[in-house]
Image (spheres, helix red, strand yellow):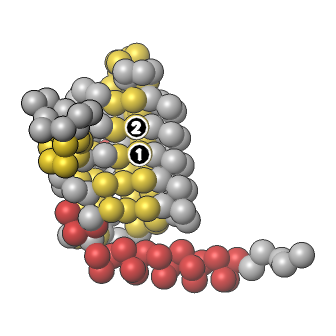
Amino acid sequence: MKRFNIVEFLKIREIRYLIYKKRLKSCGNNVTICSGTRILIAKNISIGNNVRIGEKSRISGIGGLTIGNNVSLGPEVLIWTSNHNYDNPEMLPYDGKSKSKPVKIEDNVWIGARVCITPGITIGEGAVVAMGAVVTKDVPPCAVVGGNPAKVLKYRNIEKYNKLKAENKFIKV
């Protein structure tokens, strides 16, 4: 049985980051792209500083994707930026054309495990998306959303949020 070697793990993580950093439209500092993650059309994706993309996530940049600063994506998150043409297609159930719409994830967002984000969505600053949510509509700033389809469950304490933001108290992902 082979023993886990933390040095080898760190080297692999660093290599993965360097490979994606060259392919991405832009990439900030302190970005972690965990193992098993697949990024399609990376040239249309911009990632800010202090971002973590969880294990086995699937991210499509076909329609464009912007991820802000201090964003944490849990494992197996699915972000899709295009869809098949099923409205007035030339074949059934859809044709070879795609409809692309950009996705924007603003600063200080936490997205839980196995969240699905559909094309054209904006997730507002400071929002929290609960595990397993299917996001089909824009998420307001500082909202906590969950469910399928995702709906607002409550809002964060805005005063506390603004205080922590002003004091630059961000988790290092």
Mark 2 residue type: Cys
For the residue marked with disc 1, what is the amino acid? Leu
Query: Badge 2 is on which residue?
Result: 116
Q: Residue at x 19, y 43 (%)?
A: 95
Residue 96 position in % (x across, y down)? 19, 49
Residue located 54% across and 62% down the image: 36
Q: Is residue 135 visible?
A: yes
Instruction: Determine if residue 161 is in view.
Output: no
Helix, strand or loop at label 1? It is: strand
Residue 16 horizontal/vertical position (percent): 47, 76
Q: Decide: few, some or many residues near mark 1? Use Cα within 10 Å; few <14, some 14-19, many ≥20.
A: many
- Observer-nearest of 166 and 32: 32
| Residue 148 vertical position relative to residue 21 in the rendered view, above or below | above
Q: Is there a contact, CB below 8 Å, between mark 1 and mark 2?
A: yes
Q: Position of residue 84 (x, y in %)?
A: 23, 41
Count of labels shown? 2
What residue is drawn where x is 25% and y is 26%?
137
Residue 132 x, y percent position in the rendering: 50, 31
Q: In the depicted view, which residue is nearer to us: 143 or 161? A: 143
Packing grade of label 2 (10 A; few <14, some 14-19, many >=20) is many
Give 134 or 72, whichever is nearer the viewer.
134
Residue found at x 23% / y 34%: 92
Q: Which badge, 1 or 2, is on the more N-terminal residue?
A: 1
* Residue hosting label 1: 78
- Describe residue 37's horizontal placement relative to residue 142 as left or right: right
Camera-side residue of 12 and 30? 12
